[in-house]
Amino acid sequence: MGVLVNVPTEWKGGRQVGESGNRLKEQLSAFCPHKVSPLWNHRGHTGNAIVEFGKDYASFCNAFKFENHFEAEGYGKRDWEQHKYRGPEMFGWVARADDHRAPGPVGEHLQKNGDLKTVAELENEGTRKTDKLVANLASAIEVKTKHAQELECKYNETTTSLDKVMEEKELVLQRYNDEIRNMQQIARRHSQMILNENQKLRSELEAKMQDLEFKSRQLDELAVRSDSDRRNLEKEKEKNEIKAKYLKMATSEQQKADENVLKLVAKHKREKKAALDEIIKLEQKLDAKQKLELEIKQLQGKLEVMKHMPGEEDSESKRKIDELSAELQDKYDEMDAVEALHHTLLMKERISNDELQDARKKLIDGLRDVTTARATVGVKRMGDLDLKSFAKACKGKMSEEDAEVTASILCSKWEEEIKNPEWHPFKVIMVEGG
């Protein structure tokens, strides 16, 4: 602490008044005082003030600069004690033991608020504080080092776990791709089997057409033999023409069914390709997302290790931490963009699936309209007519060859009639008693 005496005062309002502590602090700002406290008594300002400095070494130097300044100007403690007429200037010096024990307002203030210590005691106290600070810092460094090691262990464990998860993901993806390829092969074999069956039916129809044409030529040759046989031959020829007409109709229906099957197979291929493309896109986005998550975890681990590494924080370490923080923020931004794109693709996939289901229902409905008992394209419906039953019933009334043709005609006719909801082949007759 410093002592300031002979502070200018004046009598005003029945008491002594002088400059405030803030004003005196501004005048002594060159010595960086923490506080200036004027001393008062029952008469007012005593003309004395106490200048308080800090407790560090820099404040200690400022206090002696304060004393040296007043001594150099001739206003030190010795000058104050030697001169009886002191004039209007203030005198100042650093408080010592005699000031602390002196009577009066200065001594009282120092005894209440000051702590009398020697330079050696101050040095010892500073040394103790420094040793304590060093011990605390060493303990803190040891704790941070241990924490950094724990973080590094956790980081290594997390990295190992993520690598294992990525390997398992690759295996699952490989199995999934193998299953997709197997399903595609099964679908291709099924489509080829349907096409082969349709080709076989077409060959049978063509063979029967050739047989009918051959019989027609034979009938034409026999027509010239006799008038009596000519009428029978004409009737037989009319029957053959009717049979040929129905066979042509059946052939046309078979061709339409084949075309519809080919169209359906082609559409299924396009739909499967589009679905696989969407799945591949989603897998790619999922891979990118998981890769970003792995990079973010690794960057977070590196950043935590850098923050808790022991030693001085030089500019190079700060620069590395700033670079890692910036890179981590870039990865967060990229992660947000990938998640937004992933969400958009999921929405598109849902819309595409809905459209695909609607198209599938329409195709199945259309397929029911063209499906016959002899040309079933991958759809088995309850209630389809059995051609064998018609053939068995016709064989009891006509020859085997005619029965087969007639059964085909009747079966086709019944299938067309069944599609009409207003057709009622059986009549209900009410009799007495219900």
Image (cartoon, grey):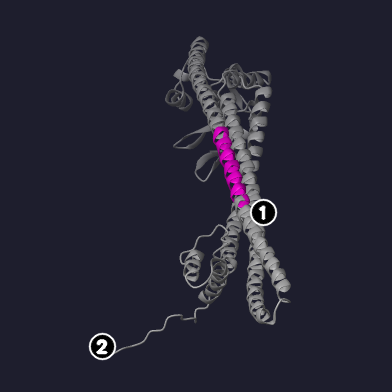
Lower position in the chain sequence, tag 1 or tag 2: 1
From the viewer's side, name the closer residue of 253 and 313. 253
Q: Are marks 1 and 2 in contact (CB under 8 Å)?
A: no
Residue 249 at x, y percent in the picture: 65, 71
Residue 387 at x, y percent in the picture: 51, 65
**Classed neighbour count for the residue bearing mark 2: other residues with Cα under 10 Å, few (<14), some (14–19), many (≥20):** few
Which amino acid is tagged 2? Gly
Which of pointers 1 and 2 indicates the residue nearer the eye?
2
Which amino acid is tagged 1? Arg
Q: Secondary structure at mark 1?
A: helix
Residue segment shown in magenta: 170-192
Q: Secondary structure at mark 2?
A: loop
Q: Quadrant of residue 251?
A: bottom right
Is there any visible trace of residue 394 in the rendered image?
Answer: yes
Residue 373 at x, y percent in the picture: 54, 65
Residue marked by disc 1: 270
Residue marked by disc 2: 433
